[in-house]
């Protein structure tokens, strides 16, 4: 069977491989196709597309938008909600405007997090964070870049420790950023010609299955077209449960490694997602 990887990050956001390099890695891994799904930007798509065409590997232009996890408006959500957009037009003006808003929210949040770290007695400056992101010409500055500075400066031993102790949702220096509603994120993806998929559903951190289903139903009503059933954060039992839900709600299934290059242990192609997932998504997206 041939496989694909439909969740991959480049240096355009918080990965460490350039978009063109990803096509080489994906081709070397023998994948039929891969999707570039950078956080809050489509800037890497043209380069990745050119490299994929040159190497004869299938390519899905994508994006991963962060949205407000409080889908039902209960005010109690503690999780993370990410929406993947597949086959988006990378130069769609509406999507570009939304992505810019999300990046502006980061520009507010990131320095605030550095200030919190400074208050905790940890020495680093926001300029260092921007320099780390700038070294890879990243369009999106995020927590992984802050983590990198904490590691480089010797404040923590690893990126994982940086998240655990300081900048993860339960970390001492975590600052939330303003988020888009899930409905607006889905609408923006669809208006850009894309198909919206719920990424790593376990990160929503909803243990109650009935509650999770209510959230999923709300997202389906808003135009969700697929759900990620294979991802390093998902156990086999999660995959089985989500596949059954996808079936029941008429959603396509997707999956990927969430590869970030050297910043995470995830390896490209590790999730063994059948190439048929890619083909079905392509058909549903109209090409
Ligand atoms: P941000 O988008 O700036 O809020 O940062 C979120 C990103 O940090 C995610 O997309 C991951 O790439 C990364 N991340 C989140 N949690 C961890 C973790 N525990 N270890 C490593 N990277 C993480
Ligand atoms: Fe990331
Ligand atoms: Fe994500
Ligand atoms: Zn991701």
Image: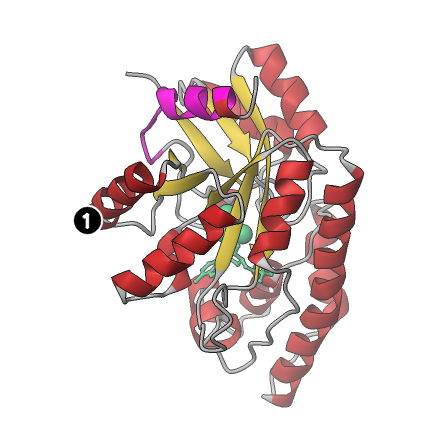
Question: Magenta: predominant secondary structure element?
Answer: helix
Residue 192 position within the rendered picture, expressed as x and y whole percent measured from the top left: 69, 35
Q: Residue at x 64, y 32 (%)?
A: 88
Judged left or right of residue 182, residue 30 is left
Determine if the magenta segment contains residue 67. Answer: no
Determine if the magenta segment contains residue 271. Answer: yes
Quick check: can you spot residue 14? no
Residue hosting label 1 = 237
Q: Nearer the viewer, residue 38 or 200?
A: 200
Q: Secondary structure at mark 1?
A: helix
Q: Nearer the viewer, residue 127 or 112?
A: 112
Q: Residue at x 40, y 23 (%)?
A: 29
Reply above or below: 116 against 35.
Answer: below
Q: Residue at x 19, y 49 (%)?
A: 237
Residue 50 position within the rendered picture, expressed as x and y whole percent measured from the top left: 67, 19
Which quadrant holds the C terminus? top right
Residue 234 position within the rendered picture, expressed as x and y whole percent measured from the top left: 30, 49
Reply above or below: 80 against 35.
Answer: below
Q: Is mark 1 within 8 Å of ligand 3?
A: no
Judged left or right of residue 166, residue 96 is right
Judged left or right of residue 121, residue 96 is right
Which region is colored magenta? 270-283
Which quadrant holds the N terminus? top left
Residue 253 position within the rendered picture, expressed as x and y whole percent measured from the top left: 37, 35
Q: Residues within 10 Å of mark 1 (few under 14, many from 20)?
A: few
Q: Residue at x 51, y 45 (%)?
A: 260
* Figure coloring: secondary structure
């Amino acid at each position: 069977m041939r496989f694909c990887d439909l969740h991959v990050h480049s240096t355009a956001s918080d990965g460490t491989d350039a978009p063109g390099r990803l096509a080489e890695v994906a081709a070397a891994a023998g994948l039929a196709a891969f999707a570039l799904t950078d956080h809050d930007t489509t800037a890497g798509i043209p380069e990745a597309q050119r490299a994929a065409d040159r190497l004869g590997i299938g390519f899905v232009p994508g994006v991963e938008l962060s949205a407000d996890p409080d889908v039902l408006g209960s005010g109690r959500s503690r999780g993370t909600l990410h929406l993947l957009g597949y086959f988006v037009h990378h130069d769609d003006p509406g999507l570009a405007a939304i992505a810019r808003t999300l990046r502006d929210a980061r520009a507010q949040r990131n320095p605030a997090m550095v200030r919190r770290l400074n208050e905790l007695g940890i020495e680093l400056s926001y300029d260092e964070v921007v320099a780390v992101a700038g070294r890879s010409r990243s369009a999106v500055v995020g927590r992984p870049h802050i983590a990198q500075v904490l590691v480089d400066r010797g404040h923590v031993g690893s990126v994982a420790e940086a998240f655990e102790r300081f900048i993860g949702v339960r970390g001492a220096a975590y600052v939330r950023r303003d988020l888009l509603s899930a409905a607006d994120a889905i609408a923006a993806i669809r208006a850009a010609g894309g198909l919206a998929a719920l990424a790593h559903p376990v990160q929503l951190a909803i243990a109650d299955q009935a509650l999770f289903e209510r959230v999923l139903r709300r997202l389906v009503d808003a135009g969700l077209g697929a759900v990620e059933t294979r991802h390093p954060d998902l156990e086999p039992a999660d995959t089985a449960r989500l596949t059954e839900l996808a079936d029941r709600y008429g959603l396509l299934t997707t999956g990927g490694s969430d590869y970030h290059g050297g910043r995470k242990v995830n390896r490209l192609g590790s999730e063994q997602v059948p190439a048929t997932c890619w083909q079905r998504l392509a058909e549903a997206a109209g090409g």
